[in-house]
Image (tube, coloured by chain):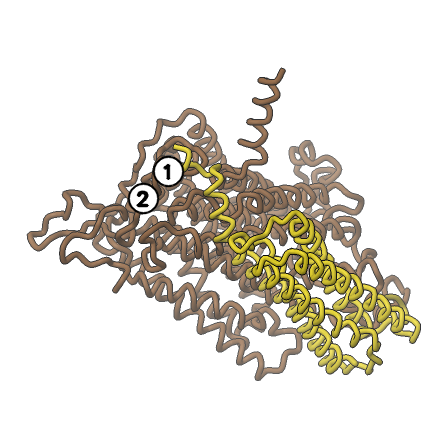
Chain colours: A brown, B yellow
Amino acid sequence: MSTHHHHAKDFLFTYVFSTDHKMISKQFLITGFLMGFIGLIMSTLFRLQLGWPGESFQMVELLMGSWQENGVMSPDKYLALVTMHGTIMVFFLLTAGLSGTFSNLLIPLQIGARDMASGFLNMLSYWFFFVSSVIMLISLFVEGGSASAGWTIYPPLSALPQAIPGSGAGMTLWLVSMSIFIVSSLLGSLNYIVTIFNLRTKGMSMTRLPLTIWAFLLTAVLGVLSFPVLLSAALLLVFDRSFGTSFYLSDIYIGGQVLEHSGGSPILFEHLFWFLGHPEVYIVLLPALGITSEIISTMSRKPIFGYRAMIGSMMAIGFLSFIVWGHHMFLTGMNPFLGSVFTFTTLLIAIPSAVKVFNYLTTLWKGNIVFTPATLFSVGLVSTFISGGVTGLVLGNSALDINVHDTYFVIGHFHIVMGLSAIFGMFAGVYHWFPKLFGRMMNNKLGNLHFWFTIVCAYGVFFPMHFLGFAGVPRRYYTNSEFPMFDEMININEFISIFAIVAMIAQLIFFFNFVYSALRGPKAPMNPWKANSLEWTTPVEHFHGNWYGEIPTVYRWPYDYSKVDSNGDYIYGEDFIPQTTPLGENEKDGGEH
Amino acid sequence: MSTLTAENINYKEELKRKTSKPLIWIGIVSIIMFFGGLTSAVIVSQGGGGFLAIEMPFAFTISTFIIVASSLSFHFGLISVKKGNYSAAKLSIIITLIFGLLFVVTQYMGWTFLHDNGYYAAGKESTQESSFLYLLTGLHVVHLIGGLFSLLVVLVKTMKNKYSLENLTGMQVSITYWHFLGALWIYLFLFLRFIIA
């Protein structure tokens, strides 16, 4: 009995309420991916409606029941799915899923620490995330359906429970879920920052940190500075909805009835929301950029080009992200002069972004590139970061933005630059660090197949959206069949939907590869990619504490690849020099100059 | 091998010593951003049409003196522990706790005054400025209740003579948060005094 009890307790604290950062990382990954898969299915469902508006899909009815009566999605369910897709993808997959997984896995391993600053807070961070995920999913099934005011939940739709079906209980649960999510995110960020600043191993100066760690650090800083502001916005919304205040609501009629609210402004919500919302773009993107830096250098067998410029550009992006939120609000009656200020600050972001792209390309240039799925997804990120970034120049400019505001141009832009870049970074990270996560290798052929299907379909989905946007097709509409001028666009929508369906099916390749490899994949060696950073000096098997014996001392930066002596021979006989190798005589540390 | 795993006591003690203070400081930064967001919201809202002046309750002025006094008494408690004078430390912390509770009482008196003078938190007769006034002060009290819990823990540990010159981290974390709550109240008081009242 006691042995059984002991085993049960062991199981509970090893797999459920673990305080080991590696287990928490896996918990974030799996929960994030499950949420992402649900978000993906949602997008496929509403793409059916957009591609073939009003057409009956009997097969979908079998799956969706009353949500798809007679095989046709109703407008309120369409709005619910669009809202939940955005919320789940932005917050649950690309914020918690991406940052939660890789910050947790890599921060202690790459800086040389036994665990996070507080394992307990780390565990709480995951469980708050889990609870918020469950509440968000439950909100799909309450009366009136889930929140339906778009992922940006602008009032008054979100502030008046009687506005649309999704403004009732679904919206309340959305706010409850997001409040818990914010607490989770803050607890995680606190831990990441303190761990990086205080628990680095001997010799691990800030200029010897892998760029992944710099990216996670800056992401956490952005989170600590911006998520509390979203919490304040959500709190004011809760008070307007439930306690009769008027922070966001002015004199308003609904169904011929005068409501008691007066004096507020929905624009206030936009200010508060986008003060988080824009840094949020980089909370999603920076970890992916950090992961890519690491993989591109390792797989090109070359030092990262412009290490310090990479850190500087991430800092610049982080700083600028706090002074550009107005570019989401050019059409709110903003003073044109203020609009030009926000245009200026927004366009400045192009500079550090271009520095990063230049450095990726120059690192790859003449490299001895090893093509793994992780390399492909990293290069894919560079591609989407460029193609999505270029359209950002259009939207960041108030004079141009006014023409395509709230059209499919915006959808195309942010899905490519933020959605695809971040998910590519996440896939790259999973393929690259899978041996560290599960002690086994993923199948490269399936990985390559997954990449090619994904990138072709992704561009097939999002590139044509720019043309829809130029034609003025508005976002979030259930159907455009009432507008004859958009009739000729229906073919483009059909084209997009076909690619969306194929893209969804292609993800099954990844899920199969992931699950099969985790259970049956070939056993991983300790350092399969011949990489320099510290995580590859830990044993393959997991145990709490990461290293047997002393934590290794670090003597150099992590990008000493293909380093040759004056005769052109590799120093130490290999094309990589782990961070734990002491500097030779007259040898300089790459991070220090 | 006992020094090599994360479960080791020495490791945990060192970890606590190294990370507790930075954790509370970064937590404080996030609270600053939270109140920064809310007070910015007041300024943005005020720009929309101007606020009517609200008569600030005198109880809030008393609150200000009380919270400053509580910070001083807590600090005196810390100094007493450092000097090994535990009886003075216990007394100081009890006084701090009483000041903390008195602060909450004076806040409540302030809200009652506002309500009696026709300034409502919500509903038909409320205004944006009155709602903000209740919200900002109320949220500060919510944070202060967290501080009172930490004070209770410090009190229990002081009673058990758990603190010493070498082991002060828990008390220092609590005092940092408490001083911050005082500073936050002074900011809110001045902000409300000059923006809304």
Question: Between residues B63 and A34, which one lies in front from this camera angle?
Answer: B63
- The image quarter containing residue A150 is bottom right
- Say what secondary structure mark 1 lies in: loop
Mark found first going from the N terminus, 1 or 2: 1
Q: Amino acid at mark 1?
A: Trp
Give the residue drawn at x 35%, y 46%: A376
Answer whether labels 1 and 2 touch (C-beta < 8 Å). yes
Residue A561, percent from left and from top = 23, 50
Which residue is found at the position 70% from the left and 56% from the top?
A: B146
Q: Quadrant of the N terminus of chain B?
A: top left
Q: Is residue A7 left or right of residue A167?
A: left
As drawn, the label of residue A552 is: 2
Q: Position of residue A54 (x, y in %)?
A: 69, 46
For label 2, count other residues whose C-alpha is less than 10 Å away and answer few (under 14), some (14-19) or many (20+): some
User: Is A343 drawn above or below residue A547 in the view shown?
Assistant: below
Quarter of the image where one finds residue A157: bottom right
Answer yes or no: is residue A244 visible: yes
Q: What residue is at 42 percent from the left and 51 percent from the top?
A: A199
Residue holding disc 1:
A547
In the image, is A476 to the left or to the right of A555? right
Which chain hosts label 1?
A
Residue at (29, 43) in percent of width and height? A371
